[in-house]
Structures are given as C-alpha cells and as structure tokens.
Amino acid sequence: MKFIKTPVKGMCDMLPADMRLREHVLGMIKESYAAYGFMQIETPVMEHIENLTSKQGGDNEKLIFKVMKRGAELQRALDKGDGELADNGLRYDLTLPLARYYANNKEKLPSPFKAMQLGNVWRADNPQKGRFRQFTQCDIDILGDDSSLAEIELISATSAMITKILGEIGLTDFTVHINDRQILGAVALAAGFAQEQIGSVLISLDKFDKIGLDGIERELLENGYDAEAVTRYLAVYRAVREGISVEEFCEGIPQEHRPQKAMANLSEILSCVRPMLAPGVKIVFDPTLVRGMGYYTGPIFEVTIDGYNFSIAGGGRYDKMIGKFSGQEVCASGFSIGFERIVTILKDHMAGSYRLPGEPTAFLIGNRVPQSRKIEVLEQAQEMRKTGAIVTVLPMSKNIKHQIELLEAEGYSRFEKVFE
Amino acid sequence: MKFIKTPVKGMCDMLPADMRLREHVLGMIKESYAAYGFMQIETPVMEHIENLTSKQGGDNEKLIFKVMKRGAELQRALDKGDGELADNGLRYDLTLPLARYYANNKEKLPSPFKAMQLGNVWRADNPQKGRFRQFTQCDIDILGDDSSLAEIELISATSAMITKILGEIGLTDFTVHINDRQILGAVALAAGFAQEQIGSVLISLDKFDKIGLDGIERELLENGYDAEAVTRYLAVYRAVREGISVEEFCEGIPQEHRPQKAMANLSEILSCVRPMLAPGVKIVFDPTLVRGMGYYTGPIFEVTIDGYNFSIAGGGRYDKMIGKFSGQEVCASGFSIGFERIVTILKDHMAGSYRLPGEPTAFLIGNRVPQSRKIEVLEQAQEMRKTGAIVTVLPMSKNIKHQIELLEAEGYSRFEKVFE
C-alpha cells in the first residue's frame, strides 16, 4: 500500500501550538464582531460548479478545486467526451457563497443583515511562503444598507477588533485607508478618458506604491492613451499632499465632474469613524487606493500596519454583485480580514510557541501503581479540573525526561510522578 | 447565467440561530476536553486519494467526494482513458487523517498524545432526515498509550462533557456501554467457530437490539454455521442478566479460552471510571456490544441516552491501524462524538430558536438624523459594547415593525429609535 504521510501540496497540518494561537485569534474576532451585532453564519464548503464559474470570481475561477461527479453521472460525462466532469467545487472565497446564501435565506434574516463568516477557502495557486492552498478567511458584510452607516460600522468594528488583537503584542499603530470608486472614476472621466477605459487606467494607478506617479505616467503612455489626458489625470494626483481632505482633493476635478454624493458620503464616513478609533489608529483619505476587484461600486478601504508591506484587511461596497446572482438587486458592503496574516504577525512577535495558559498539571502514573491509588489520582485530577485547571493523567514513559520536556514545550509546568 | 440559490445536495446553510447553538456546543466540547489535557489539532480537509482509498475506511471509501486533477495532469489522465482523474479527496472521517498526521508529526508531539479534532467530514451518502453530506465530527484519541488509562481518560472526559452539555437541558441520565473485542472473539472461538468466521458471526451478534438472540440464532443457522456451535455460542449470551460483571459473564467461557488480560483490563476500566461519573450516569459491561468497524482490537464503548434510539458517541481501541499507514505500530484508542446528534437533541428540547444572550440593543437611525447626532449614538453604542453588551446600529427600515420583529427573533430586546 502506498501511504503518503505529508499533507497534500500547499496545505498544512496544524500542531497544538498553531491551533491554540488560531483559536485564540478566532475567538477574539468572533467576540469583537458579535458585540457590533454581526451574526455568524456558515455555508457548505462545496458550491455548485455553475455558481463558482459564473465570472464573478475573476482570476480565482482559474484556481477552483473541482469535485468530480459520481457514479452514472460521471460515466455519462466521460462518455460524452467533452462533458463537464465536475458538479461541485470548493469555494475560493466567502463572498460568492454569501450571495447565494442571502438569495436563499433573505426572508428569515433581519434587514439590514450583518453577517460574519469564518471559514476555509481553497485555491489551487502555486504555493509559496505564506500562501497556502487551504486558508482561513474572516469576512463581515452588511447586506441591505445603502447608507454610510454600513461602512461606519464595518470600519469601526474592524478597527476595534484589530486594536484588541494586535494590542496584545503591543502593536497599537495602524492606518485605515479609504477612497471611493466613484471619485476614482470621476478623476479619470474629467481628465478625458472614456468610461470603458477607466478599468484599465485604474489597473495602472493601482501600481502607485510600486512604480510611483512617473511610472504610472510611462505605463499609461505606453498603453497608448492620449498624452494630454494622461497629463491632466496625473496632475490631480501630483497635487496630493499628506492629510489632504476629500473636498480639497476633489477641487482638482472640474465642478461638472465632481461626484458630490460620493464625496459627502466619504466625508461622513471619515467624520463618524474618527471619534471611534483607539489612540494610534488613523483613518486617512487615500486618493490612490484602488483595490483590485472590479465589482466594487463605492467606498473601498484597506488596513495597513506600520512595518509590514501588506494590508491585513480590505473591502468595499459591491452594490451590483448579489443582484447578478439573485436577480434582485441588494446593496452590500464588506470587509475581509487577512486571518493568516494576523496569525503570522502574532507569531513574529512571540518568543517561542503559543503555550497552554495557566499551570497545567500532568500526573505520570508508573506501571506498578495499584488500582486503588489510580482511583485516588483520577479523583484528585477531576477535583482540580472543577476549579478550571488543565490536568492530564498519563502513563509514565520509560524516558520520563523526554516525556516531561515535550509536555513542558506545550505549557505543562507541574508534574506529579506516581510510582506506587 | 444559470444561478442555483439552494446549497448543494445534502448540505446546509447555517442560519444565525443554528450557528449560535453549534458554536455553544463546540465551545463546551473544547473546554471540557481541554481540561482533560486533550490538545486540539487540525488536518487539511483534503487528503491524498491514495490514502483515502487504502481500504482502511470500509464502506466510507465508496462515498468519497473526489477532487479532480488540474491542467496538464488532468489532460494526461483523460488521454490515458482509464487513468485516475482525482489526486485528492475530501476526508470521510477524522481517524484516517489523524493516522497520517501522527506519522508526519510524531516527533514534535508529547507521548502519549491526547488529540482533539473538531471538523467537517464529507460523504456522498443518500441524504435523508438527519443525515447530511457535510457534517461535523468531534473526535478525541489517545495515541501511544497501551494501558487502560487511555480508555479511563477517554470515557471519563466524554462522560463529563456529555453531563455538562445535556445537563443544561435537564438530561442527566445516560449510559456508557463497554465491551472488549477480545472477549467477543473468545466466546466465538470457544463455541467452535473458526478464527476467520468471527467477523461474520459478530455481524449477526451486532443485530441483537433489532432481532434478539432468537433472530441471531436463525441468521447464523441460515448462514450455514454448525448448529452445535451456534447453540453453544448463544447459550453464553442467554445466560446474561442485567448488571452482569465481566468475571460472571466470562465464567460461560471455558477456562482455556478465557482472555484473562482483556478481562482484567476491562474490569479495571469499569472500576476506575465508575467513581468519576456524575449521578445519573452509568457505565455497564454490555457483552452484546459489537460496534461495526473491523479495525477495533480491544475495548469498545458507546454512549446511549434514555429515550433516544441512537448512540451519541462511540469508539474503541484500534492498535493496528496507524501501523498500517506509518509502517511503525502505534497503539491508539479513540472516542467519536455524534456532534450533529447532540445538536439535534438540544434543538428538540428547546422552545424556539437559540437566541443571542443578554439584552442586545439595536439603535435604529432615521434617515434625517444629522451627522453630529449619529456620532453621539455611535459613541454611546461603543461605550455599551465596552461593558460586554451586544449593540447594533442600523438604518431604520420603512417597515420598522417588521424590522424589529426579525431582530427580536434573533434575541434583540432593546430598541432605541433615533429620529433626529
């Protein structure tokens, strides 16, 4: 028999210390979001292949783990030669299942509905450091609220959650970046780009952190865009200085192109969120923030931590997406938390592994201990557990030193050897 | 675009009330077992198809959801005509992945290792009431302990956990049944059956609850077994009366066939577990307990609840299984908890759904409320959250009565309407 003892490619076995850290973080996320009224829900890990391949998932659709049909249905598909061999697939994110879930259960749910999801997703990506084929996502979404209150609650709740978790390791400084897709669009239109060019122009602007405004200019010109439009476009961004307000930035957009409603909305979010933030946390209007996903329609936001070159949370408003699935338009805005990144940051800052809390006790029972003494020890252990202690009763190993070392590594600090 | 809004066949969308109940039960299970020194671990939901189809999973191997190869590898398999199209599959239980995990990580783990797993498994079974294609299993296993201490800890911990969870709904009476595969084998051998017939004989004995001893006798005779052996075999079971001890039962086995070591071991488990049990909980020697899985080698056990015709937990010792995978024999004993059954029992006993705890508050904000007032409300909500309260801030719906009804259904009891 061929037995493979490593996990499948790109996936991880979680050791006890890994699990303790992950459970601790998950617990804090759940508690934080629950206090803000987000309700935990869950969808099956498998979705209909038709839903997964409906062009809502962008590049993720190329990375689907497909689940094969079974029995006669599989045979029919094989006989056909070019039939679809899969009927299901593993979800590649939590947003698409949420859209299906909401279409299926809307009548039973409060409106607006504040959803919290914590679950694994799967992508057949090339595994690399920090990128896995099975990983945990934490999403919060507010469905059915078209007002700025949705973003205010999403951002306040997420900031509070991050403050709580990273505060434990003394990381109190982070920044929420916010922008609006409609402002991004207005700048491009005002500069002279056509509506259908905006997507491509934004792909270039999205590279701001990597190539700067000069690099973006070069790229836009290389892509054949009108030189005057490019100059007008970049002039607006060249005028940006630190701490610029929405109103100040939008003065660079000719009056007739200014997205007044989006501007007022964004200003309101900034004004309402600011008083909610802990010391050390900033929310800034970031006119060059783009965020990749094409489905965003309004405010977009992202959280960065000083000293890390990746964002640990990101999201935005996607008012058109659920409607594409359910036939009935439902406004929606959501925040996705980089759970694996938070875990990585916590690990970086910890000396050693994440150990059992308190002073766990191990009773080590020698092999000549009579039954009556065993019962005494078992009863003593049970009494200790009633006070909240972690207590294990184990047979003593021949190599007791090694046995104790491995238990100490997990956090056991008290050892009671019972010889007779 | 074809969009399917129901979940895939046999799987469930979990509503907020479902999730609250499930999370509550999962939390109690984790806490109970952690106190006994069980350490939570996790394996990927996908396993190598070679491992899943290695004949350790019995009938479950027919129910595997297979994950298709991708890209060039899939094409190669298709071109071959009879190639294996899948490289992975979804796990159908937590025991096989545990065997792989232990082989992969043994050196890093304490010995003996007390593992706790809570996770979903998938089986392409025919869905029916209470049987799903994705469901949660909770397993505890002790690896590397060949003594009765393993069973004592498994059974004590599980009894304490069930007492705690079902005690909440006033269900305090349940029974742990225990037997030993070696005693079952000894009775059959002593009656005159051959070693290789034991498996088949036990399949008949396993039907005791359904067809009784007379039914078993008929079935064994129909299967062509020697009439005298059948009579001798059943005589041992006909002599069983309530409360029979291991020693009394084994007097029915001729001296030379008596499995002395297994008998002493089983008696020790009974003697040591009994003082640990809460009032209302019994542990009984049950000579007709068989349990289906062929891989059990020693003590086997099961928990039944008065008034329910199914067991809610079951397990046993499987000393040969891990060795078949890792090449190195590792003794093991485990208990699998019927998580979905516990959830079903709790649901049966609850009036209404599982609601949010405490007195959650909803602020409902009218659409003409000025920004300054919104900030006041948001700050008030945040202060309340600091005291542990659940507080949501929502835009007021046009149909405010319906909005409040749906929130009340989830457990909200305080509503603050903010009009200006």
Image (spheres, coloured by chain):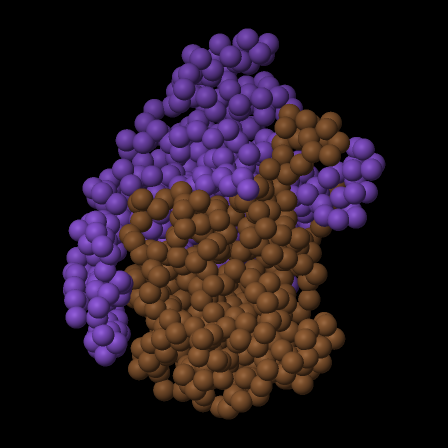
Chain colours: A brown, B purple
Give me the residue at 47% from left, 35% from top. Answer: B10
Vertical order, B397 against A261 (above or below): above
Give me the residue at 59% from left, 9% from top. Answer: B224
x and y percentages locating residue A56 in the rendered image: 55, 53
Q: Residue furthest right?
A: B80
Give me the residue at 68% from left, 30% from top. Answer: A77
x and y percentages locating residue A188 in the rendered image: 56, 74
Residue A309 can be seen, yes or no? no
Q: Nearer the viewer, residue B126 or B49?
A: B126
Left or right of B410, for residue B110: right
Can you tell which quarter of the image residue A232 is in? Answer: bottom right
Left or right of A127, for residue B305: left
Vertical order, A184 against B264 (above or below): below
Vertical order, A280 against A102 (above or below): below
x and y percentages locating residue B51 in the rendered image: 68, 44
Where does the C terminus of chain A fall, quadrant-wise?
A: bottom left
Where does the N terminus of chain A fall, quadrant-wise?
A: top right
Give me the residue at 34% from left, 60% from top. Answer: A145
Left or right of A39, for residue A214: right
Residue B230 can be seen, yes or no? yes
Q: Nearer the viewer, residue A385 or B99?
A: B99
x and y percentages locating residue B249 in the rendered image: 42, 28
